Image (cartoon, grey):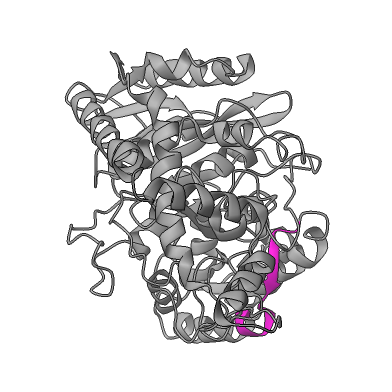
Amino acid sequence: MRPDTSSLPDASLTNLRSLLDTGWISARELTDSHLDRVAEADGPLNAYLRVTADLAREQADRADERLAAGESGPLLGIPMALKDVLSTKGVETTCGSEILRGYVPVYDATVYEKLRDAGAILLGKLNMDEFAMGSSTENSAFGPTANPWDVTTVPGGSSGGSSCAVAAREAVFTLGSDTGGSVRQPASFCGVVGLKPTYGRVSRFGLIAFASSLDQIGPFARTVADAAAVLGVIAGRDPRDSTSAPVEVSDYVGALTSDLEGVRVGVPREYFEVEGIEPGVERAVRGAVEQLRALGATLVDVSLPSTTYALSTYYIIAPAEASSNLSRYDGVKYGYRSAVEGDLVQTYMATRQYGFGPEVKRRIMLGTYTLSAGYYDAYYLKAQKVRTLIKDEFDRAFERCDVIATPTSPTVAFKLGERTADPLAMYLSDLFTIPASMAGIPGVSVPCGFSDGLPVGLQLLGRAFDEATPLRAAHAYEQSCDWYTRKPA
């Protein structure tokens, strides 16, 4: 029986792959069903900054031609969307900022090139915190994104548009960027899977930089298998990115199993002793850890004592790198330019005063201060030393275990506007995701329950360039429960 096209957005990538390959549906039908869902649902959510309907239909028709010729592939004919931090030739890319309003790149990000060549279909560009600076997607110059589970709450950030679009079935999968948790934390808030690969696993060419030693691109999807399939396409060495590593790309989908026999799961006590962790979150995550044991895993106590310093270290290093990266936005080369008359310095100042939002200005000032003469050694250099300690602690922990299990966030999604006046409270949202970013290791967030009617995420961390192990653990857990089948009304 031919499937009802209106129900196609509810299907996983794996199921859609089968329908496309057998000819039960066309890529054009699949694309139109998702464009209809965006038109129907996105109004109150504001996940999309722009919808590329004409381009999507052109790409869908080409995908159908390839399918008719007998070609196949994991992403051929699959509709997706991109965080607006990724360059797309001919499609406006704003990074959620007024200073880049109207900027149309002349080149594609490597990850988009790979997706396009694999036959994936671009539905549009997604909302985000300005220059990826935030934990709630309330810092966008184009308005906040809402959480589809409760539109009075945030979807997380900075990739809130990417997580919201997957949860609301407005795309089969999306890409976001993770600097201190901006894939994993919004995945937790929206009840979807979010994967941050190892730093260097995925090319950053075409990713508009926030903090270059931390930024990494990763997928959002409804299942772990879907996320694994996307990673298999976008991962790999890129000669245009000197930080991308020449490390062999694994068969991530083939590594997924339903049991965890022989897998050692580390449980760090520091992540469960943090003041402010919500009881419902702790209860759900501890239940998930016990489920990992029931699947055959061995639980191991590990200690990561420098976890308490990770947040402070991050908010020295990341703003410092941001202040350097964002110096290029001066009103001369591209983007917004102030009409204020005067000398060049006045043009710079007026452009940046209007073009940047308050959170971006805050981080530029903080970063410039920590890099200034007399403070570099006291702050930035010391923070880099602590970063090394954090990495060393993870290395020692992985001598005793294969994967580390923690909460993704200490809380569920909070109310829109609740933390905008208190930056420190906002920064604490990334308390559990930042250490892995500082160490450069991979992490995946998978739904593990609900607290107060909102999703909770389980974070699974792995050794550098061993995404396969946390993905295996996440998949085994996911398939033993039904959390991933839940969807917002």
Quarter of the image for residue 41 reads bottom right
Residue 121 versus residue 129 in the image, above or below: below
Image x and y of residue 423, in percent: 63, 37
Question: Which residues, given as a range, are shown in magenta?
Answer: 46-56
Residue 275 appears in the figure: yes
Quarter of the figure with the C terminus: top right
Image x and y of residue 402, in percent: 24, 29
For the point 77% across and 54% down, which residue is it? 45
Tally the marks.
0
- Left or right of 42 in this view: 53: left
Quarter of the image for residue 115 reads bottom left
Image x and y of residue 283, in percent: 57, 15
Question: Residue 51 colored magenta?
Answer: yes
For the point 21% across and 31% down, which residue is it? 392
Quarter of the figure with the N terminus: bottom right
Residue 306 versus residue 357 in the image, above or below: above
Residue 30 versus residue 439 in the image, above or below: below
Given residues 3 and 275, the one toward you in this image is: 275
- Left or right of 441 in this view: 352: right
Residue 196 appears in the figure: no
Question: Residue 464 colored magenta?
Answer: no
For the point 36% across and 70% down, which residue is it? 205
Given residues 103 and 165, the one toward you in this image is: 103
Quarter of the image for residue 386 reads top left
Residue 452 versus residue 383 in the image, above or below: above
- Left or right of 460 in this view: 25: right
Image x and y of residue 227, in percent: 44, 51
